[in-house]
Amino acid sequence: MKKKRVSKKRNPMIGILWVVAVVVLMAELLVYTWCRVQYVQTGYEITEATQEHLHLKELYSKLKIERARLRSPERITRIARQRGLVMPDSKQVVVIP
Amino acid sequence: MRSRSKKKSKPLKWIRFRIIVVGAALGVCFALMMGRAFQLQVIEGEQLRSKAVGQYKKALHNCSKRGSIYDRNRAELAVSIDLSSICAYPGKISSTKKTASALARTLNMKRRPVLEKLLSGKRFVWIKRHADPTEVSQVRDLELDGIDFVTESRRFYPLKSLAAQVIGFCGMDGRGLEGLEFYYDSFLKGRETNRTVLRDALGRGFNAKGPSPEGKPGHNLILTIDKNIQYITEQALSEGVMEFWAKSGIALVIAPRTGAVLAMAHVPRFNPNSFGQYEPWSWRNRAITDSFEPGSTLKIFLSAAALESGACNPRSAFYCEDGAYRIGKNVVHDVRPHAELSLQDILKYSSNIGAAKVGEKVGAAYLYNKLKEFGLGERLGVDCPGEIRGSLLRVGDWTEIDTVAISFGQGLSVSALQLAAAVSAIANDGILMKPYLVQGMTDVQGRIIKSFQPTVLRQVISSENAWRLTRMMERTVEKGGTGVRAALRGHRVVGKTGTAQKADPARRGYSKDKYISSFVGFVPAENPEIVVLVIVDEPQKHHYGGVVAAPVFRRIIRETLRYLKVPPELATPEFTGPGRGNKREGQRRPGETLRVSYEAPAMG
């Protein structure tokens, strides 16, 4: 006896739903991956910015030292003497009240 | 039918057999995988996890930055900078000899010590600590195996030797070894911290977690020292020491109203950036750690005791024995013989015999108590390490000659700081202030964490007697006084000279040719801004305080008053001085200008 095949008519919506589900999953995967990449990238940027900040602070510190060295009374006195400057006599000092 | 079914079942069996074989093989593989997974995840899981963490996580040890030290106008006196040190892991070096040669050539070092370090068998050795940036860059370019660079903080003193003995210095490890660096080490040094950094395959760090990469920085110190006054004082003292070929010198400038130390100078000086090149004794803050016999400067406190006891007034007369006064086996001499001198003239001419007689009149017990009240023979509690007490015998141990000797400054010792603080009490209406060097602490953002206020220790003498004493001391700087070389045009200067013979342990007595010359005083007389003490140790050409120390004092006050914009009290260009007899002694009239003609100092 030959079996009769009963052909079922598939609902087209199911296929669409599958496609949508796959697309959503793929999109989610892509977004997640993008987020991870951004996270790592931001991590690098933060590290770079921190390094830059440290570098600038160190530079600032060195400039402060340089300023202190340049403002040294010993250096200023030496330059003043080289240019012929002398301490004023008390008669030369006029105190403005 | 049966034969057909037999034919059909044979391939079916084969297929089943193959399915079973493949299934079994896959099952075995799966079982192996599961077993391996179990081994990796469960049995060796912890160990492998830590190994993996070690590859992508890096623990960083953050050395904290030491706080800076500023002067009272926030000028940097001591700061920390980051420098790279070059180190080596000898086990990782492929060619030790070549590496040693390359390092020695680049770092301008001898090859042998470098090679010895690399062959020492240690896992880690320093090649050069705190190397120059150019040297570090050159060594980096060599790309040597097993050579690494460590960033370390190094203390730097931009003003070099300025106030070096006060500030002190730090060792290679960043710990304070001397001075304020040592005393405030726990505040200056920060807290070291640890943080974790994730690394990628290339070893680049990212996404650091934990505290700031700089650790927890230390607090900054704001000193009472003024770098300009310090410089003026150091320069004047250096010139004085050089002029008289002296062994050393100390000078102090104190604000008498607060006790703030504006300058504390020492000669010889040293550069704390390379302290190892100097003698260790030159590192010491001798104004605080060393004591000396004050000599005639002690007559100030004797006079204070005499006035305060009520036994004398400035005009009380004493017979000065024409220059020689015998007490038992001892004879006290004056430089110049005097017949009779008033108390104020004893101070003016610095008569030892007069002082001895004043001491006898005041009495040992009263004098002892007054000296103690002035802070002599006791620590004042200054915020600096190694403060010395000085020596002042208990009054019960004083003999008759001790009372006499102490009256003119022998038989006791004081530190320079004690002497300056005691004179500050006279300039401050008789109130003794605690001297201090640090006025505050700030955090890394500059916010004040702690501030130190002036501290009153006690009222030593009455305000009236302080003013009387001021007038008496002012006469020392007048014509005929021992301190004329300290006089300054336009200002009323108050002071006292001191010349003390140094003890000679070999002779068990006083040396004949070693002296300490000193001058202590304050200015302006009406409203004192600064108290200055100058001590010159073992001057060679002359030894009198009025000749050696007074000119140094004069230069310090001249330039400091100009710097502080203190106008001359006496407006006329001619020398004018304190009036005598135009107002009752001891009566202070603030704002009153005394203008009586005054001759210019003969020697000044």
Image (cartoon, helix red, strand yellow):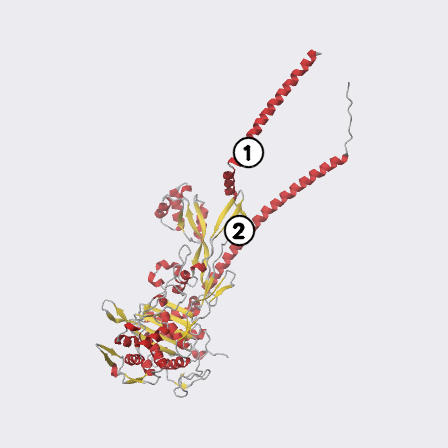
- Contact check, label 1 and label 2, Cβ < 8 Å: no
Look at the image and tell me whether residue B308 can be seen.
yes
Could you say where residue B18 lies in the image, as x and y percent from the top left? 62, 21
SS at badge 1: helix
Q: Residue furthest left?
A: B329
The vertical placement of B103 against B577, above or below, is above
Q: Is residue A38 left or right of residue B552?
A: right
In the rendering, which numbered label is found on residue B37?
A: 1
Type of amino acid under label 2: Gly
Please name the amino acid that badge 1 sits on.
Ala
| Residue that mark 2 sits on | B210
Q: Could you tell me which quadrant the N terminus of chain B lies in?
A: top right
Where residue B261 sits: x, y (%)?
A: 42, 70
Q: Percent x, y for residue B519? A: 35, 75
Position in image of residue B342 (x %, y %) = 32, 84
- Residue drawn 51% across and 38% down? B48
Q: Quadrant of residue B494?
A: bottom left
Residue found at x 51% / y 53%: B213
Both marks 1 and 2 on one chain: yes
Q: How many marks?
A: 2
**Pointer 1 or 2: first along the chain:** 1
Q: Vertical placement of B574 versus B148: above or below?
A: below
Q: Is residue B67 left or right of residue A32?
A: left
- Specify the farthest residue to the bottom: B582
Q: Nearer the viewer, residue B195 or B88?
A: B195
Q: Quadrant of the C terminus of chain B?
A: bottom left
Question: Residue B542, located in which quarter of the rendered image?
Answer: bottom left
- Chain letter of mark 1 equals B
Disc 2: host chain: B
In the rendered image, the vertical position of residue A27 relative to residue A58, given as above or below: above
